[in-house]
Amino acid sequence: MDLRPSDADAAVRAEAGAWLEAWLSAPEHRTDDPRLDLEWRSAYQRDAYDAGWLVPSWPLGEGGRGVGPEAELWIKLDFARRGAPKLPNVQGPGVVAHALNTFGSDEQRAHVRAVARGDVWWCLGMSEPQAGSDLASMRTRARRTDGGFTIDGQKVWTSHARDSSHCLLFARTASEGPPHRGISAFVVPMETPGITVVPIEKIGVQDEEFCEVFFDDVQVPESALLGPEHQGWKVAMESLGHERDMIWIMNLVEIEAANELTREALRARPRPELTLEYAAVRGDADAIWLTGLRGLASRVAGRPDLQTPLLKLFSTETAQRAFLLARRAAGLDAPERVGSELLAGEIEALGATLYGGTSEIQRNIVGERILGLPR
């Protein structure tokens, strides 16, 4: 694959970039706090959907422009580098909309536009106290009853549960066979009797709220089932796969930012003992980008993408190394601007190895599903 976009992809990337720059520079879109200004971030999501740049590969008029996968990758990278606002309810277009579109009934697919545009928020019922990153170990159960299911269990680290209209819930519907084959997906309104939401208090400023969600004798109809019964693992994997590129792209941009801080620090105060470490992190950043391109090439060619699953692990751990190196290069007397950027980057990099599957679980996934190692 050429490491530069084709003329057509370069043209659509330029068009998308021009739209984003115009949006960010408009007087009505200025903000003093891009991280915590939810109104600003929500306005971006609506406008990007309406303009067709929210998910460029989606059809025209449905949040996209119908571009190919290569053009979409270039646009995502360009938007991340230009500082596109973080979506306030990222799992909406990132996971839920794809799940509803791919597996939903006509009634369920009717939610897609509002979810993707951000008109309503949905939460994901995945992580549990005993199954944080290991979805197959979940204990929340959905038992068949007359006309539907009864759900009992607990979810944790559920983003935006208190502000969501619905939950895309994963629960165990069978105990026999491999654990991942007995899971089903459900569309559950959060106002359903028996659901209790308890916010989790966090230290420091937070841009999203985590919650515990308890399900006690929650009754849902047969129509709440999303996709075939016992096929929730497939729903989860195919839906989560749509955000795979965005995860490593965002990490790559964070690594590039840390490397720039390191470069500035070493130019102002040369530290020969850090130069080789800096070169190694720069090389890892290039490797992340090239591996992402290889994964895309595999998907375009119809081959199994064995590359992209490596990048969540590799990019998050490289981001941690990059910010730790930048901190050492800058020193304790770093300017306030640099110190603030380093602190924000370090916090984000530490969390990145936990959310979306811890590094330990990612290593298991790589070993078992890519390398074919025994459990």
Image (cartoon, rainbow, N blue to C red):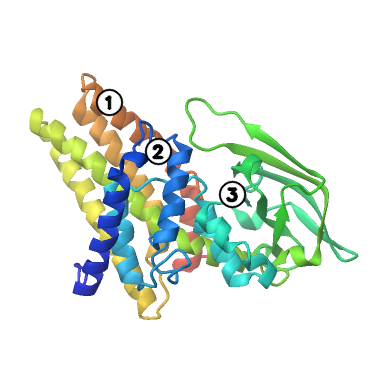
Q: Which residue is mark 1?
A: 339
Disc 2 crowd, CA 10 A, few/some/many (<14, 14-19, 20+): some
Examine the image and state in which quarter residue 237 appears. Answer: bottom right
Taking 340 as reference, is 39 above or below it?
below
Taking 3 as reference, is 169 above or below it?
above
Q: Which residue is mark 3?
A: 121
Drawn side of residue 311 relative to residue 290, left or right: right
Drawn side of residue 100 relative to residue 93, left or right: right
Q: Please say whether residue 144 is visible from this viewpoint.
A: yes
Q: Please report whichever mark, 3 or 1, sits nearer to the chain's N-terminal start.
A: 3
Drawn side of residue 162 relative to residue 316, left or right: right
**Amino acid type shown at disc 1:** Gly
**Amino acid type shown at disc 2:** Glu
Cα distance in 3D space between marks 2 and 1: 14 Å
Cα distance in 3D space between marks 2 and 3: 23 Å
Examine the image and state in which quarter residue 107 appears. Answer: bottom right
Q: Position of residue 154 (x, y in %)?
A: 72, 45
